[in-house]
Amino acid sequence: MTNNRVQTNNTSTKRKAEQSAGSKRQQRPKLDISQGPKQRLSNISTSSISSSTRLSNASVNSNSSRTSTKSTSTANTASAASITKKAIKSTKASIPKWDTKGRLNQLQTKLSESNEKVSEIEKLHQDLESSVQSKESLLKEAMQKVADLENTIKTTTERHQDELKRIREKFVSKNRDLIYHNEKRKSQLSTFENELSSMEVEYRKTTRAIEDENKENAALKSTKRNVEKSLSELDADTRSKRLKKKATAEEKSVQLSNQMKSRNRYVQELQGELLQNEKLRRKDHDRLQELKGNIRVFCRVRPSISSTTEPNLINARFFGEDNESMELTEQVSSTLGKTTTKSHTFTFDRVFSPASSQKECYEEISQLVQSALDGFNVCIFAYGQTGSGKTFTMQGPSAPTEETSGMIPRAVQQIYEVVQQLKQFGWEYQMKGQFLEIYNETINDLLGNTMNYGKIKHEIHHEKNGKTTVTDMTSVILDSPSKVKIMLRKASQNRATGATNMNERSSRSHSVFTLQLTGHNTKTGEDTSGILNLIDLAGSERLSMSGSTGDRLRETQAINKSLSCLGDVIHALVNNKEGGHIPYRNSKLTYLLRNSLGGNCKTLMFVNVSPLMEHFGESLCSLRFATKVNSCQVASAKKLVR
Ligand SMILES: Nc1ncnc2c1ncn2[C@@H]1O[C@H](COP(=O)(O)OP(=O)(O)OP(=O)(O)O)[C@@H](O)[C@H]1O
């Protein structure tokens, strides 16, 4: 019966729970002590059942969401049922009906137990409710998610449909393109096929041609083999010929080498002979010079140089087998007034007419230059009155050409050439030049500074070996002909000149160009030292003719004195007796030229003569002076060999 009641209550509770689904919390019944025990128990049961039913409902409601919730709900329902059963059993306890107090106590105990259980159940209920709430919230979230997912699915579906549509359209367009391209390819294919068929035709043709060529190649190869065979035969032949030639060449080379050796020996012999010949030549040359005389005199009459007036020229005749004579004629009036022709004949080693060139003059003196190279002291003078052509003969004009250059540049040029030739005989030469002037018995360095003129006292020293030196003189190494030109220019600038009424460019000093030639033979070890003096003497005119006064008079006196001393020296040499006195010291000029005038030298004097009638007297004087020199017999010259 109790079971039925509980069931009924349970059903009604379930109904109530169904009706109030969604309600979260129900009012819990409170125990009323004033009620009777039965009533209270019933309330408790009802309340418990109601709770249990609610729990069961909640369990049903949440069943759909989680299985775990379902099991919890089932457990709660079972617990509620057991509590109700315990309560009913306890009412059936064996306390006698009359023991109201006992029963009340029993009931109170049970009530407190029930209350404990109720509170447990309530706690459970609370847990369940909170669980339900969380499940509900989860459910809500899940529902929301479902809705979201549905929305997403919807949008995605729509998007996919759009995409699908686009793809379909694209596919249709692509398909159309493919169809078009396909058609195109088909047409191309047919073209290719046509081309291919024509290429096949071509290929067949080419194949045939290749076959033909192969046949031809085979024929050519066979020809090549034949040619190669012939070539190898030829090669072998050539090799054997080459070997033969090589052997012949080697034989010839040996022969040639032997020939070369014998030639070298021959050359050496020839060189030896040449050296001997050179020595002989030197000896012969010396002998010839000796035979010609160690003092020679040349006469040179300069041409007329006046271009404006017709000058009154001397009457001169040049004759002799070797052009050695000259005849000057003059009209002489006697005291009775009778005019007769007087002739003056002069004979020298050579006479040069006004037509003679510088080259002709030099040819005659070139042998003396050679003597200087061979180691002799050589002295070449130019003597004559002012304006007779001394400077022109010795140096050439102020602007010389190849034709007009004088004896000094020609001598240096010849020396350069001979020095080159003599190199083959082992001769090596050094050439040093000095240029001085003797002005008023004072020596000046023509290659030095004119400011020093008169300040530096140059002294003349004669060494035992026959060499003459002048102190503080500038020496120039003349290693090229161009240096001689520079040197002559400098000297002519420095040379003291003064105007007289005889010649606008009259030289009032003696100029002495000295070329020292030092030679060494590397083959024979021989050394030579020669000196070539080229002297341009000052004008030799007499005092009465020069018309000089004052300084010029003193200059002329000094010049005349030195020239007179020169005459004296030559006169003494002419009449030289063994150990006889030669007055060299009487003038600077003769003292300077001591080694060039006498036994140890070769001397040449140019007597320069003016062609003008007005200079006739002076010319006669010069020619007489030269005749004196020419008759000078000097002992054989001694070569300066160190
Ligand atoms: N053979 C010649 N041919 C052409 N001109 C000449 C010849 N000899 C001399 N002369 C000229 O005659 C002039 C005088 O000559 P140069 O000056 O040589 O005489 P010089 O005897 O040296 O006189 P100085 O005693 O004053 O030095 C110059 O103008 C020169 O050029």
Image (cartoon, helix red, strand yellow):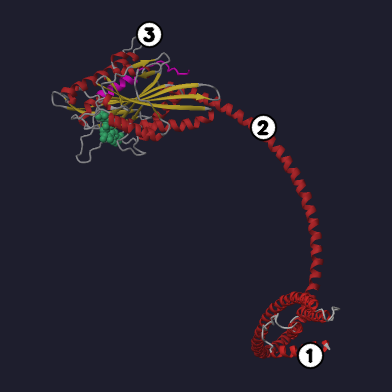
Mark 3 vs ligand 1: CB below 8 Å: no
The magenta stretch spans residue 630: yes
Residue drawn at the location 80% of the way across and 56% of the way down? 232
User: Which quarter of the figure is the N terminus placed in?
Assistant: bottom right
Instruction: Mark 1 vs mark 3: give the one in front.
Output: 1
* 377 horizontally vs 119: left or right: left
Residues 461 and 609: in front is 461
Determine whether the residue tagged by mark 3 lies in a helix, strand or loop: loop
Foreground: disc 1 or disc 2 = 1
CB within 8 Å, label 1 to label 3: no
Query: Magenta region: which residues?
Result: 621-642
Q: Is residue 267 above or below residue 228?
A: above
Q: In the image shown, does 8 or 95 lie closer to the viewer? A: 95
Q: Quadrant of residue 567?
A: top left
Total of numbered circles in the picture?
A: 3
Which quadrant of the figure has residue 166? bottom right
Residue 559 seen in the current view: yes
Q: Amino acid at mark 2?
A: Ser
User: In this rendering, does residue 316 appear at all?
Assistant: no
The residue under label 2 is 262
Disc number placed over residue 579 in the picture, else none: 3
Q: Quadrant of ligand 1?
A: top left
Q: Earlier in the sequence, mark 2 or mark 3?
A: 2
Which disc is residue 8 wearing? 1
The residue furthest front is 98
Q: Indicate left or right for 227 with 314 as reference.
A: right
Tell me if mark 1 has few (under 14), some (14-19) or many (20+) residues whose alpha carbon lies within 10 angstroms of its own.
few
Q: Position of residue 556 (x, y in %)?
A: 21, 22
Q: Nearer the viewer, residue 507 or 49?
A: 49
